[in-house]
Image (cartoon, helix red, strand yellow):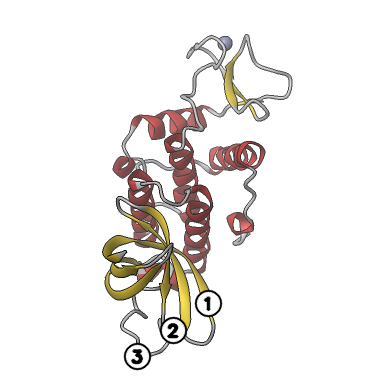
Amino acid sequence: MGTVKLQGIVIGERIQGESNKQIVVLAKGVGRVLLSARGARKAKSKLLAAAQLFCYADFVAYEGRGFYSVTQAELLNSFYALRTDMEKLAEAVYLAELTDRTCPEGTEQDEILALLYYALTVMEKGILPPQMVSRIFELKLLQISGFFAPPVCAVCGSEDGRLFFDWQEGAFLCERHHTPGSILLHGAVRRAAAFVLGHEVRQVFGFNLAPDALQQLENLLGGYMEIHMGLKLKSRHFFR
Ligand SMILES: [Zn+2]
């Protein structure tokens, strides 16, 4: 109980009545929290600017029994340019939803918060195509969450020769151990998985892929999230 300071990114918003809204914030040191922002939809509200999707802000909140109510907010970065480009906006909405769905409440998620911040920055500045940013984000998110092993054979650990991917097992497999249903991994996708695993969050957005490799990575990650995490978000394909 009392007042708390929270710094984080708004990853969800829900309208409540005529002038109130609830926002979901991924906050530093705290993880995913639900904040009620009373009056945040009124034009004169001091909370209006910061209580929007993607906003990175400092929030002062009153902590009651099982809820937080925002009393002050200072906007640090609105990622405004994401809203001026339909493709960027669609992918950013997807990243926010994916974060909201995969981060449990009440657990510190600072690495994922940093990943989201860098992803939105790279997307906003147009450093990489929005879909490329989303795939790198997914790969790192899965690795941080403990879902993705390094791209070596899950049976024998071999790094040599061709590598395959089995969706049902969610595993990479070598020439000798690959299963009938597994797909041959694109060399560039294999290097991408190794690069993302081997680099820290602030360095992972450092490569691009040709369209065919990007397509395979998209299929691979989409299938993996659906089978192993029960995640099939419509926003992932909104733009197409
Ligand atoms: Zn093997």
> Given contact means CB atoms under 8 Å apart, are the residues at marks 2 and 3 in contact?
no
Q: Which residue is mark 1?
A: 15
Q: Is mark 1 within 8 Å of ligand 1?
A: no
The correct choice, above or below, for 49 with respect to 99 in the image is below
The correct choice, above or below, for 185 with respect to 27 in the image is above
Q: Secondary structure at mark 2?
A: loop
User: Hey, what amino acid is under mark 2?
Assistant: Arg
Q: Nearer the viewer, residue 26 or 156?
A: 26
Q: Secondary structure at mark 1?
A: strand
Residue 199 percent across, percent down from the top left: 33, 34
Q: Which residue is mark 2?
A: 41
Residue 174 percent across, percent down from the top left: 58, 14
Q: How many marks?
A: 3
Q: Which residue is mark 3?
A: 44
Q: Residue at x 30, y 53 (%)?
A: 28
Q: Earlier in the sequence, mark 1 or mark 3?
A: 1
Q: Residue at x 64, y 49 (%)?
A: 232
Q: Residues within 10 Å of mark 1 (few under 14, many from 20)?
A: few
> Given contact means CB atoms under 8 Å apart, are the residues at marks 2 and 1 in contact?
yes
The correct choice, above or below, for 1 with respect to 110 in the image is below
Residue 211 — which label? none
Left or right of 132? Residue 112 is: left
User: Hey, what amino acid is under mark 1?
Assistant: Ile
Q: Residues within 10 Å of mark 2 (few under 14, many from 20)?
A: many
Q: Please tell me in which quadrant of the rendered image residue 217 appears.
A: top right
